[in-house]
Image: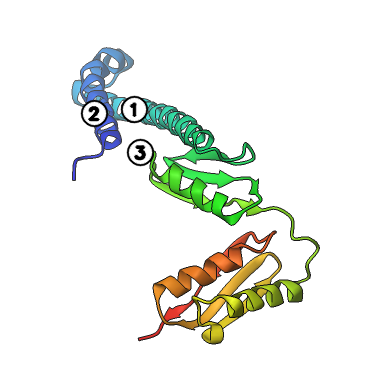
């Protein structure tokens, strides 16, 4: 693993500051009454602080510029994928946050997938929501998900428990495979208005 470039910039700023401060310290402080060693030490300290501060500012500027480039790229691939303009990507520290609303769960998945392919992206937080819960109550949402789980031919739903907390779904219990776990999570996401699905399903040994 290579050394982080931002670390090198800060280290260089610190080192240059120490050297320049040590050289210029006597020029500045000896006339004020300090001896040469004290002037050099004080100059080196001040130079180190200023050099590190300047290098840190450069690192922040580089990071922000990089984030703007990644944000432009992420939003470009969303549009190229034919996804609705309601989906937007924001980038901070190379991590993408997807926001907005869609009509279909598949659009949410596609947005996550295409943005993850952008070089330089460190991670994706998918906060895209499905539009409108249609006025469903908590009980109605729970019943809708449970019925969908029971009618799915590829899923044994007997070991799955559904808990609804406002627009957040928690899936608990045991399934036979990762495929069943993924299928159950997708079913939960297909209920309009759901903002979060927490999959706590365990895979049977």
Which residue, given by chain and number where applicable, does mark 3 sit on?
A: 120
Q: Can you give x and y, in whole percent of width and height, for residue 37 in the image?
A: 19, 25
- Answer with the quarter of the image where residue 22 lies: top left
- Answer with the quarter of the image where residue 53 lies: top left
Q: Residue furthest right?
A: 135
Give the CA separation, mark 1 to mark 2.
Answer: 8 Å
Q: Secondary structure at mark 1?
A: helix
At 32% across and 26% down in the image, what residue appears? 51
Residues at marks 2 and 3 touching, judged by CB atoms closer than 8 Å = no
Give the CA separation, mark 1 to mark 3.
Answer: 22 Å
Among the two numbered marks 2 and 3 on one chain, the one whose residue lies closer to the N terminus: 2
At 69% across and 60% down in the image, what residue appears? 192
67 with respect to 23 (left or right): right
In which quadrant is the C terminus drawn? bottom left
Residues at marks 1 and 2 touching, judged by CB atoms closer than 8 Å = yes
Which residue, given by chain and number where applicable, does mark 2 sit on?
A: 12
Is 46 located above or below residue 172 in the figure?
above
Q: Nearer the viewer, residue 82 or 35?
A: 82
Among the two numbered marks 1 and 2 on one chain, the one whose residue lies closer to the N terminus: 2
Q: Can you give x and y, in whole percent of width and height, for residue 36 in the image?
A: 20, 21
Q: Which mark is residue 55?
A: 1
Among the two numbered marks 1 and 3 on one chain, the one whose residue lies closer to the N terminus: 1
Give the CA separation, mark 2 to mark 3.
Answer: 24 Å
Q: Nearer the viewer, mark 1 or mark 3?
A: 3
Q: Secondary structure at mark 3?
A: loop
Q: Secondary structure at mark 2?
A: helix
Q: Residues within 10 Å of mark 3 (few under 14, many from 20)?
A: few
Q: Can you give x and y, in whole percent of width and height, for residue 49 in the image?
A: 34, 30
């Amino acid at each position: 693993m290579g050394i982080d470039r931002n670390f090198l910039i800060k280290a260089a700023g610190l080192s240059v500051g120490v050297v320049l401060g040590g050289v210029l310290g006597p020029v500045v402080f000896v006339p004020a009454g300090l001896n040469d060693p004290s002037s050099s030490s004080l100059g080196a300290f001040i130079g180190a602080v200023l050099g590190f501060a300047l290098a840190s500012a450069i690192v922040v500027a580089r990071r922000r510029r990089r984030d703007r480039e990644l944000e432009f790229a992420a939003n470009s691939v969303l549009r190229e994928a034919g996804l609705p303009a309601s989906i937007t990507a924001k980038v901070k520290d190379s991590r993408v946050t997807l926001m907005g609303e869609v009509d279909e769960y598949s659009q949410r998945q596609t947005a996550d997938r295409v943005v993850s392919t952008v070089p330089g992206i460190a991670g994706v937080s998918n906060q895209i929501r499905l539009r409108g819960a249609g006025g469903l109550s908590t009980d109605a949402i729970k019943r809708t998900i449970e019925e969908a789980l029971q009618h799915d031919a590829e899923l044994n739903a007997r070991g799955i428990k559904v808990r609804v907390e406002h627009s957040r779904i928690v899936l608990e219990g045991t399934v036979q495979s990762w495929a069943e776990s993924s299928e159950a999570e997708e079913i939960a996401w297909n209920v309009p208005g759901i903002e979060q699905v927490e999959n706590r399903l365990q895979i049977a040994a």
